[in-house]
Image (cartoon, grey):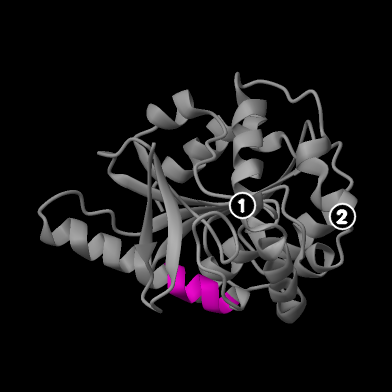
Amino acid sequence: MTYRTVRFPSGREVGMAGLGDPAGGRLAVLLHPTPGASGFDPAPEATARSGIHLLTFERPGYGASEPSDVSVAGWADDLAGHLREVEATARTAGRTRFGRVGIVGWREGGVYAAVLAARHPDLVDALVLVAAPSPSHAAGASEQARGSLAAESPWPEPAGFSDRLQRMLDAAKENGDDGITRDRRAFEESIAPPPQSDTRSLILYGTDDDYATVRDAHWYAAGFPDAIVERVEGGADIIGREWERVLSFLRQPG
């Protein structure tokens, strides 16, 4: 894993981590939950052999990212601008031409992922939402619901999942509750009809998840008419259980 800070087109300094195959020809982004931070890999061995270069970014108030007020759409646009710069730099340097990218949103990260895919169809060719609540559900979530990642125990395979998750949650707390507060404000402002896009999409929700439910999955599916919606075993942990499936979907040609 490589960890550093980058500057987005807006001038905002953002913490990020690069995971998976740094020489891979496929670029994808994993957007973290609330709370969350960059550097979390659901299953490093699977990611490493996937041929995917996976980037993770910290939203304002988390980890090394500067605190700032930004809407869901504003963050999505800023991230899209950075990804275009990454592609341009790789092309100029004569390295891999990434082209369009895949986006994965886990839990509340799905709110940002869906908006990014809808606003930038020329950039995003695959979207995966994993146990993602709708914005209204995320905005009204109780402390207990948002703390469910830390509370759920024991976590299943893949090996080391619990330790990697705890490191992410610890990094997310470096600025106290600032990131949670900013996320929640952004969710409240983004409550609206579902984002609309024909982006190739996979929406997964868990059998044991009382937070991100079938209603949330179908809220997103209403805006992504070609989406595959699947009910799978588990709760918030389905990011680990289904990670190979997620990677396979991202690798498929758009």
Tally the numbered discs: 2
Q: Is residue 26 magenta?
A: no
Q: Secondary structure at mark 1?
A: helix
Type of the residue with mark 2: Glu
* Residue 132 horizontal/vertical position (percent): 72, 54
Q: Is residue 23 at all visible to an observer of this figure? A: yes
Type of the residue with mark 1: Glu
Check the picture and name the quadrant holding the N terminus. Answer: top left
* Residue 156 horizontal/vertical position (percent): 72, 22
| Predominant SS of the magenta segment | helix
* Residue 85 horizontal/vertical position (percent): 28, 67
Q: Say which label, 1 or 2, has the lower sequence index.
A: 2
**136 versus 37 height, above or below:** below
Q: Residue at x 57, y 66 (%)?
A: 60
Please tell me the numbered disc located at residue 209: none
Residue 19 or residue 119, whichever sits in front:
19
Res 59 quadrant in image? bottom right
Residue 14 or residue 247, whichever sits in front:
14
The alpha-carbon separation of the residues under discs 1 and 2 comes to 18 Å
Relative horizontal placement of residue 83, taking residue 153 as reference (left or right): left
Relative horizontal placement of residue 156, taking residue 145 as reference (left or right): left
Q: Residue at x 59, y 31 (%)?
A: 164
**200 versus 79 height, above or below:** above
Please tell me the numbered disc located at residue 143: 2
Res 190 quadrant in image? bottom right
Residue 47 or residue 75, whichever sits in front:
75
Q: Residue at x 60, y 41 (%)?
A: 168
Magenta part of the protein: which range?
73-79
Residue position for label 1:
174
From the image, state whether disc 1 or disc 2 is nearer to you: 1
Mark 1 surroundings: few (<14), some (14-19) or many (≥20) residues within 10 A: some
